[in-house]
Image (cartoon, rainbow, N blue to C red):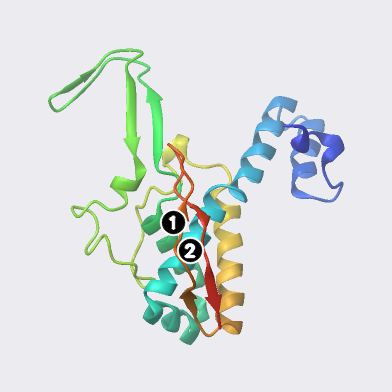
Amino acid sequence: MAQCARPALDPDGLGMIMYRAADEGELTEEEAGMLVRSFLSAGVDTTVRAVGGALESFARHPDQWQVLRADPSLARATAEEAIRYVSPFQTVFCTAGRAVDHGTIRLQPEDKIFLSLGAANHDPRKWERPDTFDIRRRTVGHVGFGAGIHGCAGQMLARLEMEVLFEAMARRISGFELAGEATYALNNTTRGFKSLPLRIR
């Protein structure tokens, strides 16, 4: 991706911090490039789709917007619930590195594994009222950014972007209404809108 290469980056931006770390031997050049791509994708895929899903949810559940307006400090909780509820990154595909027995399932090395993060984030065994958008919900344990060593490298940036946005909007916007039919972008990995007509008050 040309936009992630050194010449394309702002010399004072986050991307160049990664490349300076490579210059100082803390990372390899390849690792720096991968981190830059990860951080840029945090602002493109998961974040954009989660924000769109949250705004659509607020239009459908205006009481939740009023909760946030009354207490903008819930902006971080709103971001977490948006990631859980919307699950903008729906699927992960893995390959078994070794043989594994899990209950009645036996995986062999090189077996392909499909994980549905969207289903996990709506599993009623984990979440009370999983299909309800509730910004006061305790969202610890959602897998909207993956988990463990497979967690999104840009998740803290994505969380911060969403928190700052929701807090600023809560102080300035009284509400949202759907202004037409929303359409989803067709994608086998991410879930988000192609078009989301909203009326903002």
Marks 1 & 2, CB-CB < 8 Å contact: yes
Q: Please identify the quadrant where the N terminus is shown.
A: top right
The disc at residue 31 is none
User: Could you tell me which residue is drawn at 45 percent across and 66 percent down?
Assistant: 56
Mark 1: which secondary structure?
A: helix
Q: Is residue 192 above or below residue 94?
A: below
Q: Is residue 177 left or right of residue 18?
A: left
Q: Is residue 133 left or right of residue 46?
A: left
Residue 111: x percent and y percent? 32, 16
Q: Is residue 75 above or below residue 1?
A: below
Question: Residue type at mark 1?
Answer: Ile
Residue 179: x percent and y percent? 49, 72
Mark 2: which secondary structure?
A: helix
Question: Residue type at mark 2?
Answer: Ala
Residue corresponding to mark 2: 79
Residue corresponding to mark 1: 83
User: Could you tell me which residue is drawn at 41 percent across and 68 percent down?
Assistant: 57
